[in-house]
């Protein structure tokens, strides 16, 4: 296996339908009109020297190496900036051109460290046949300028910079952050981050790595390459962070990972990345990673390292004992949205076939379960309707309850690019997320609603659409259930749903709601993107249905540029849901009570399956506290830190007799575990992840599991020990079984994915290469189903004791409970969770910037530092949940979505008061955690 | 009877004391109890006579100059009669003016620049009227037929540029006037803005009408505070007058540069107008297709635009009948440097360089022989006396590796060291480079260093060969004319004045 070097065509592809034929160095080539000569040449196999051009960026024309001669035209135009024309005759290698190129290279090398000419620069010098540098090296130069090493992951060395602006343009055009610039003019021109006096770290740089990737020399280079040396081989795989599902080349030197480079062929990211996927993979080798199985009799004991056999045997014995003593339903399992489809499938198969019950659930329960239910009910499919490319054709983008620039940064960059091209933006969020106003992007409307009032605001938007005659009657007539529409239209038209009424409930001015509705309904292709700010509510499902209603009523479904798109939080939330992780569903969202369908599984698995749905995660906790649920197998999820009402979760875990945690680290849940099975990272196994656009991407094994077994192999071992042996030699065989049992996956195989790069389900006979956009020419369920979405206020209310509303979210540099990102240098950006509070609320409480404050709900309290900002409205406070020291979920409540039990993380009535520092509980917790994580120094048996 | 006096408010006249003269006139008139009216005009462009004041008489205007404040009492005492030593007679009779064909500068120095009625009284506004009666398409045809070429330096046919913009469909188009007059020895843009601003406004309105643009910008260099002030006031007056505004369907805004020469290059000017760093854009796309804010944009030099009203008012044929070869009409030639009669001389193309500097310019100011003339600004070639037969024509200059540019001629006497001048060209390029393209950013500095070696006498043959190679790289490799034309002064100096590159190093060092 060798290093993958992707072809760089120099300039972006043209999408013109018109074809143009020209001759380059005697070769005829036909390309779309608008293609640059440089790209046409590359397609004809003629390589024109270039340094400032790369096909991820618009042509710039600054290096002046790519000059060509065109018959009948004077001069030596740059091939990157000159478009092709019919019958053009181009020469790329005349003596005159080579002389100019040598002249340019001579200039470059006269201001470049001798002997260290690097990367493309040296190659280009060789290509143009440059001999000596006649200017000498004594002239003015940049060789002694200071390096900028402030970023933890990469270095900028001005001595090696050729000022081609590729980094600046990548920041502008690819990442759309505009953190970089060229300072000074002429010879003094210099790449600079931020304003005068800034460095990369202090600037607005989000460390996405686009600049490093774009750099044609070693001026911007990963510190890991400097430390470890140049990579020698690469493996294309899929990022294991958020639901965007970026493809990366894992570049290796020997058995060591040197760097992760975004893969241009990745259909979700098209060669872009964010700070997490690009750089934050160091956790895979972190000293705290556990590589040996461990167990203990009780949670107050230290851990003992044991062999895999002993650990697996212990799990099986305990689970069997618990079932014998407390019944078949006393144990269960939780699948992970971090693991592969195949692993997830196996865990639910273990529970259903091996445990003999349906007590399986997944972390999607606490994030996107309302999406599954809401979109299935209205459209017929539990998934987003579009591919990411769709956003390039959107005219209006509605972002609600999502913060893409932090949580889905790579997609956010594409969204910002489209917004900069002129698409309009509506943001519905209690907090002023970056998209509301960021360099070169500004929302047309920001409806800063009170947390918990999504459904009301969506009804008000619908009210305007219906009462102002903005609905797409034709679409509704053709594709939707007319009766359902009429019933719904009458409902939303009721004055109780008018913007004027809803403005009182939501705090959003009526006129703003009206304007936003008019824009959404009348602005062209309108696309909805939403996140957990929609689902994690007592009316999460209602709001998802409300979004579906809006899209259907305005005809914004069934073509590129429109749709209803959940932004999935984790790499494989979509997949874990698809794989039958919910207690009531088998793969492909088919209810367990469907006898015929269940029968097909029973036949293949050779086991009778329970037709009754099992316990959901919160039910498991309740049952544990009640004493009926005794054993749990948790794969790759830190339920203690991530689920709401931490103390209740802790009590439930403490009440169980056998908690088996399979993870990379001793996470918070592991503090209550009896058996710890070390997990493998995404670099150490084969499989697939399914991203937010239903795209099934390959995860490829880059290195052997450091813990000795891939996660799927561990599940197989447990299953075998439980007496339910499964036979798979490779994860591809698991996918083959999924395809056999699941109509929407019927055509999926590893071979197909390898051939196409990725595939979006449904993939079957009707769509052998997958389905980028769903519901074209009709809904999967038949007719689109309008659901009445009555607004019911949450029971969680502010009052004299708890006058503020807390809402939670994520930040760019950290990921969920932070198990991975906290173990990387990403902590330089966010080393603790802070509480955002409006200056007005802070003033009232005597809270100053950086003060410790106590955050208290009726459930419990914690302390953290305050950040005073008007990003949040008065009456609203906000924090992240990345750090166990804070345990933001200590304060969140037991309330949940009426349909799916998705917790109401986003609305908690709280009080904030000045504090001296961490609370007693936090100190005790920290002590307990430390105590629980002890590993006995005795040798393993 | 009130006596009308005309005192220029042109920056060049003010620089030599016009304001003080005006004050002195007012003071003296007050002391004498004489009723006078002082009209502040533009300049007629005879700079060696500034401050040149004029007095209105029954027989027409009579000029005096150069006037110092101390001359004012004697002027009054002599009742502005012919007997005064500063008496110049009717200005139109002065040979420097008599030999000119003033079309663009017909009103400059005569009218009150900020009087719309004066403007109309002297024939202003007729061009726009005719354009309106012709219609947009015919207006462009008329401009094309006149043979008018871009006066900023590139010499691109104005009518064709307009047609390209007119033919490019867009929801919005712009007219941008390039008044970032940065060439050494040039001042025509400034004079027209200070002396006849409504002319420029009218030209822009015609351009907007012809191409379908409703918004214009005038980009003026910050070094022209007077021009900025006059244009801004003229725009307000034009709005009141109805030449601009809702009814005229055209608005103009003045934008001020920030001191970068390269922002006179049209694409970096557009970037600067957009609020960005003034950096050259690659072409294509042409500004005519994708210019300001990505919209089709006419970018014309101030003189090109200011010439359009006359062409339309009096017809393209008359304008096209003037000139030489493919250079039609007149050019405001600006004589500067060490020249006796420095000033603006508008004449049809075709005069030889010798006629211009020797006869019209009158040789050097200090009387030494002319050794070299740099034509076309800091990036123009140095012409030796041997080439003084070159007719003033875009093609003829190009044939001799030179350029007309914006019409500047800078005269040097025989004390000039052409090696230093060659170095200066590279230094200028280094100073003004935007830094985008490699040849200009690095080549200018390396060129300077290499030229220093030549001056110091180090490996002269090898270094001259290197300079020649560098000039090839600059000429064919640069992104814009800044780097692309820097070889003109350098190579012309080496070619025509080789002896200066072979002087004993000591002499060169002493010249520092």
Image: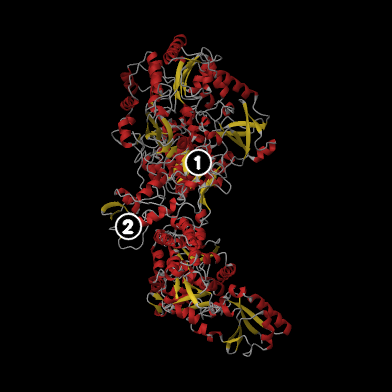
Chain ID of residue with mark 1:
A
Total numbered circles: 2
| Distance Cα–Cα, label 2 vs label 1 | 38 Å
Callout 2 crowding tier (Cα within 10 Å): few <14, some 14–19, many ≥20 = few
Q: How is the image coloured?
A: secondary structure
On the image, numbered disc 2 is attached to which residue?
A95
Q: Where is A799 relative to A923, above or below? A: below
The location of residue B315, given as percent across then percent down, is 42, 78
For the residue pair B284 and B208, the one nearer the viewer reads as B284
The location of residue A386, given as percent across then percent down, is 39, 39
On the image, numbered disc 1 is attached to which residue?
A155
Q: Residue furthest right?
A: B31
Q: Looking at the image, is mark 2 or mark 1 earlier in the sequence?
A: 2
Residue A31 in view of the camera: yes
> Viewed as shown, does residue B66 lie left or right of B176?
right
> Viewed as shown, does residue A592 lie left or right of A456?
left
Q: Secondary structure at mark 2?
A: helix
Q: Where is A673 relative to A165, above or below? A: above
> Are the two marked residues, 2 and 1, in contact with CB atoms closer than 8 angstroms?
no
Chain ID of residue with mark 2:
A
Residue A489 in view of the camera: no
The location of residue B438, given as percent across then percent down, is 44, 55
Q: Where is A550 relative to B390, above or below? A: above
Res B256 → quadrant: bottom right
> Viewed as shown, does residue A438 lie left or right of B389?
right
The location of residue A608, given as percent across then percent down, is 35, 16
Q: Nearer the viewer, mark 2 or mark 1?
A: 2
């Amino acid at each position: 296996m060798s290093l993958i070097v992707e072809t760089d065509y120099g300039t972006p592809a043209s999408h013109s339908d018109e074809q143009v034929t020209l001759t380059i160095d005697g070769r005829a080539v036909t390309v779309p009109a608008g293609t640059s000569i440089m790209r046409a040449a590359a397609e004809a196999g003629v390589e024109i020297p270039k340094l400032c051009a790369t096909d991820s960026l618009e042509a710039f024309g600054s290096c002046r190496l790519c000059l060509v001669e065109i018959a009948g035209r004077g001069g030596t135009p740059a091939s990157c900036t000159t478009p092709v024309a019919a019958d053009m005759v181009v020469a790329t290698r005349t003596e005159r051109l080579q002389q100019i190129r040598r002249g340019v290279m001579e200039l470059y090398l006269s201001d470049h460290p001798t002997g260290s000419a690097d990367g493309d620069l040296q190659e280009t010098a060789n290509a143009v046949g440059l001999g000596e540098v006649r200017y000498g090296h004594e002239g003015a130069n940049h060789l002694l300028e200071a390096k900028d090493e402030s970023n933890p992951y990469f270095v900028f060395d001005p001595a090696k910079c050729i000022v081609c602006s590729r980094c600046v343009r990548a920041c502008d055009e690819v990442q759309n952050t505009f953190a970089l610039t060229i300072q000074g003019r002429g010879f003094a021109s210099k790449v600079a981050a931020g304003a005068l006096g800034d460095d990369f770290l202090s600037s607005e740089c989000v460390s996405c790595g686009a600049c490093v990737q774009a750099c044609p020399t070693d001026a911007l280079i990963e510190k890991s390459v400097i430390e470890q040396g140049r990579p020698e081989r690469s493996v294309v795989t899929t990022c294991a962070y958020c639901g965007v599902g970026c493809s990366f080349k894992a570049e290796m030197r020997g058995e060591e990972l040197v760097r992760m480079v975004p893969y241009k062929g990745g259909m979700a990211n098209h060669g872009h990345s964010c700070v997490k996927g690009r750089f934050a993979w160091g956790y895979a080798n972190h000293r705290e990673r556990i590589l040996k199985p461990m167990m203990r009799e009780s949670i107050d004991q230290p851990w003992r390292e044991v062999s895999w056999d002993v650990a697996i045997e212990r799990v099986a014995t305990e689970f069997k004992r618990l079932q014998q003593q407390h019944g078949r339903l006393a144990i269960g399992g939780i699948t992970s949205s971090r693991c592969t489809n195949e692993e997830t499938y196996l865990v639910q198969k273990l529970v259903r076939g091996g445990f003999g019950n349906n007590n399986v659930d997944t972390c999607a329960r606490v994030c996107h379960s309302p999406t599954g239910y809401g979109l299935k009910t209205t459209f017929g499919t539990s998934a987003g309707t579009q591919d990411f490319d769709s956003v390039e054709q959107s005219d209006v983008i509605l972002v609600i309850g999502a913060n893409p620039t932090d949580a889905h940064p790579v997609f956010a960059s594409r969204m910002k690019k489209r917004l900069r091209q002129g698409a309009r933006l509506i943001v519905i969020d209690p907090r002023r997320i970056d998209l509301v106003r960021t360099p070169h992007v500004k929302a047309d409307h920001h409806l800063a609603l009170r947390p918990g009032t999504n459904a009301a605001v969506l009804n008000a938007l619908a009210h305007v659409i219906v009462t102002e005659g903005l609905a797409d009657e034709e679409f509704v007539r053709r594709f939707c259930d007319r009766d359902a529409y009429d019933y719904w239209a009458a409902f939303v038209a009721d004055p109780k749903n008018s913007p004027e009424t809803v403005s009182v409930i939501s705090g959003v001015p009526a006129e703003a709601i009206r304007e936003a509705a008019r824009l959404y309904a009348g602005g062209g292709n309108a696309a909805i993107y939403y996140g957990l700010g929609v689902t994690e509510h007592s009316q999460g499902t209602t709001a998802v249905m409300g979004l579906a209603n809006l899209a259907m009523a305005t005809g914004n479904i069934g073509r590129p540029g429109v749709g209803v798109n959940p932004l999935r939080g984790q790499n494989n939330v979509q997949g874990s849901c698809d794989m039958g992780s919910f207690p009531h569903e088998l793969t492909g969202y088919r209810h367990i009570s469907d006898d015929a369908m269940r029968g097909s599984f029973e036949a293949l698995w050779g086991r009778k399956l329970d037709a009754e749905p099992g316990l959901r995660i919160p039910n498991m906790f309740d049952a544990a506290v009640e004493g009926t649920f005794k054993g749990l197998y948790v794969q790759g999820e830190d339920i203690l830190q991530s689920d709401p009402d931490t103390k209740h979760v802790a009590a439930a875990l403490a009440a169980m007799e056998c908690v088996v945690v399979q993870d990379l680290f001793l996470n918070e849940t592991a503090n209550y575990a009896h058996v710890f099975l070390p997990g493998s990272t995404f670099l150490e196994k084969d499989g697939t992840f399914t991203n937010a656009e239903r795209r099934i991407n390959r995860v490829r094994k880059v290195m052997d599991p450091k813990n000795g077994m891939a996660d799927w192999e561990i599940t197989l071992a447990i299953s075998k020990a439980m007496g339910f042996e499964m036979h798979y030699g490779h994860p591809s065989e698991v996918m083959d079984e999924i395809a056999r049992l699941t109509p929407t996956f019927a055509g999926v195989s590893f071979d197909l994915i390898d051939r196409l790069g990725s595939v979006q389900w449904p993939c079957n006979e009707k769509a052998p290469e997958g389905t980028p956009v769903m519901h074209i020419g009709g809904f999967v369920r038949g007719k689109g189903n309008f659901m009445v979405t009555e607004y019911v206020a949450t029971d969680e209310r502010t009052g004299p004791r708890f006058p503020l509303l807390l809402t939670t979210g994520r930040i760019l540099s950290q990921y969920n409970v932070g198990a991975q990102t906290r173990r990387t240098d990403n902590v330089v950006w966010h080393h603790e969770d802070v509480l955002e509070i409006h200056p007005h609320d802070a003033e009232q409480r005597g809270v100053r910037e950086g003060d410790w404050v106590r955050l208290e709900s009726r459930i419990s309290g914690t302390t953290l530092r305050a950040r005073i900002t008007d990003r949040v409205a008065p009456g609203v406070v906000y924090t992240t949940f990345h750090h166990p020291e804070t345990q933001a979920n200590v304060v969140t409540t037991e309330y949940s979505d009426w349909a799916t039990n998705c917790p109401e993380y986003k609305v908690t009535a709280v009080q904030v008061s000045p504090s001296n520092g961490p609370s007693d509980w936090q100190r005790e917790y920290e002590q307990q955690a430390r105590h629980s994580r002890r590993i006995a120094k005795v040798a393993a048996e | 009877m009130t006596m009308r006096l005309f005192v220029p408010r042109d920056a060049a006249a003010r620089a030599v004391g016009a304001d003080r003269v005006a004050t002195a006139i007012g003071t003296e008139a007050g002391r004498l109890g004489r009723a006078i009216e002082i009209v502040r005009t533009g300049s007629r462009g005879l700079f060696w006579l500034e401050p040149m004041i004029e007095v209105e008489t029954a027989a027409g205007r009579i000029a005096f100059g150069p006037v110092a404040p101390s001359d004012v009492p004697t002027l009054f005492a002599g009742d502005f009669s012919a007997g005064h030593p500063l008496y110049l007679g009717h200005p139109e009779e002065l040979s420097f003016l008599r030999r000119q064909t003033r079309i663009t500068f017909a009103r400059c120095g005569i009218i009150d620049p900020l009087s719309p009625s004066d403007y109309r009284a002297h024939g202003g506004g007729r061009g726009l009227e005719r354009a309106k009666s012709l219609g947009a398409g015919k207006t462009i045809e008329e401009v094309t037929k006149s043979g008018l070429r871009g006066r900023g330096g590139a010499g691109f046919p104005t009518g064709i540029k307009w047609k390209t913009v007119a033919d490019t469909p867009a929801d919005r188009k712009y007219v941008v006037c390039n008044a970032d007059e940065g060439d050494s020895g040039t001042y025509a843009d400034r004079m027209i803005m200070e002396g006849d601003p409504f002319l420029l406004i009218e030209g822009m309105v015609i351009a907007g009408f012809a191409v379908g643009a409703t918004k214009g910008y005038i980009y003026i260099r910050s070094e022209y505070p007077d021009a900025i002030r006059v244009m801004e006031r003229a725009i307000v007056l034009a709005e009141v007058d109805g030449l601009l505004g809702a009814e005229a369907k055209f608005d103009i805004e003045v934008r001020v540069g920030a001191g970068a020469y390269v922002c006179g290059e049209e694409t970096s000017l557009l970037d600067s107008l957009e609020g960005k760093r003034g950096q050259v854009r690659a072409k294509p796309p042409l500004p005519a297709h994708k210019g300001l804010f990505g919209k089709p944009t006419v970018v014309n030099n101030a003189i090109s635009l200011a010439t359009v009203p006359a062409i339309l008012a009096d017809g393209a044929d008359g304008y096209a009948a003037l000139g030489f070869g493919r250079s039609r009409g007149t050019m405001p030639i600006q004589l500067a440097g060490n020249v006796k009669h420095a000033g603006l001389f508008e004449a049809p193309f075709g005069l030889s360089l010798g006629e211009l500097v020797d006869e019209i310019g009158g040789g050097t100011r200090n009387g030494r022989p002319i050794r070299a003339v740099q034509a076309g600004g800091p990036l123009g070639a140095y012409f030796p006396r041997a080439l003084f037969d070159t007719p003033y024509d875009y093609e003829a200059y190009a044939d001799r590796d030179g350029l007309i540019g914006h019409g500047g001629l800078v005269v040097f006497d025989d004390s000039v060291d052409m090696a230093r001048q060659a170095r200066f060209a590279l230094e200028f390029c280094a100073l003004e480079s935007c830094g985008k393209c490699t040849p200009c950013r690095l080549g200018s500095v390396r060129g300077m260093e290499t030229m220093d070696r030549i001056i110091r006498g180090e490996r002269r043959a090898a270094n001259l060969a290197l300079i020649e190679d560098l000039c090839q790289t600059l000429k064919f490799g640069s992104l814009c004319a800044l780097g692309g034309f820097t070889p003109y002064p350098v190579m012309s100096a080496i070619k025509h004045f080789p002896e200066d590159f072979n002087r004993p190093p000591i002499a060169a060092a002493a010249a520092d």
